[in-house]
Image (cartoon, helix red, strand yellow):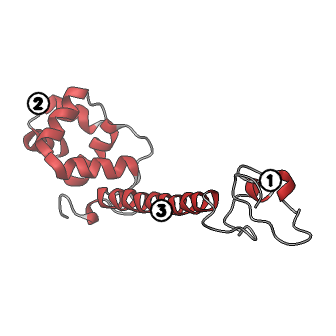
Amino acid sequence: MTYAGAEFLSDDWQVSTRNVGGVLRAVARRLWPTNTAKQAANAWGLELTTAVNLTKGHASERTITKALLAGDWPLLMQLGEALYGDTYAEHLLTVAQEAEHARAQAAERAAYVARLERIAAGVERVDHLSSDVPHRQRHGGAGVRGDDVGAAKGGARQVTGRGRS
């Protein structure tokens, strides 16, 4: 059993509450199945009576802080995983995926705005509006006058946003 390894928190171990003191208690019991209070007191620099209270799930902010500072990153990462249900690596992967998705959406929006600007400048001709144009704009919304929509019985008209040509 490693201190920071994935096998430390097995699949069957679940914390029912999001109480840091309770999670710290569970982590201590997993680390030291026997003589938990004595070993936690030695490892985390706690008084024995404080460590006994910790093994009962009663921990003050001062006790939690002292244990976290003594346990360093491995302990903090275990607490985070128990509290949030994800490892730190999984969390970072999710954040990276969300950032990539946001970047892709921003690029799509920028391309759409550039197309609308070309249409408005008269550089690009609009004979038909493609499916990427929002519904509002296909039916007389911004940039398209109502009499231009469907008025192409005798032929398509160019809509430039400045009137008909």
How crowded is the residue under tag 1: few (<14 C-alpha within 10 Å), some, or many (20+)? some
Disc 1 residue type (three-letter): Gly
User: In the rendered image, is residue 159 in sight?
Assistant: yes
Image coords of residue 60 (percent x, y)? 25, 27
Image quadrant where residue 38 sits = top left
In depth, the one of 155 and 67 nearer the eye is 155
Q: Earlier in the sequence, mark 2 or mark 3?
A: 2
Up-down relation of residue 48 to residue 99 (above or below):
above
Q: Which residue is mark 3?
A: 107
Image coords of residue 109 (percent x, y)? 54, 58
How crowded is the residue under tag 2: few (<14 C-alpha within 10 Å), some, or many (20+)? some
Q: Is residue 127 left or right of residue 147?
A: left
Q: Is residue 146 left or right of residue 38?
A: right
Q: Which residue is mark 2?
A: 47
Q: Earlier in the sequence, mark 1 or mark 2?
A: 2
Q: Which residue is mark 1?
A: 140
User: In the rendered image, is residue 32 in sight?
Assistant: no
Residue that appears at 36% across and 62% down: 93
Cα distance in 3D space between marks 2 and 3: 57 Å
Contact (Cβ within 8 Å) of mark 2 with mark 3: no
Residue that appears at 23% across and 47% down: 76
Disc 3 residue type (three-letter): Ala
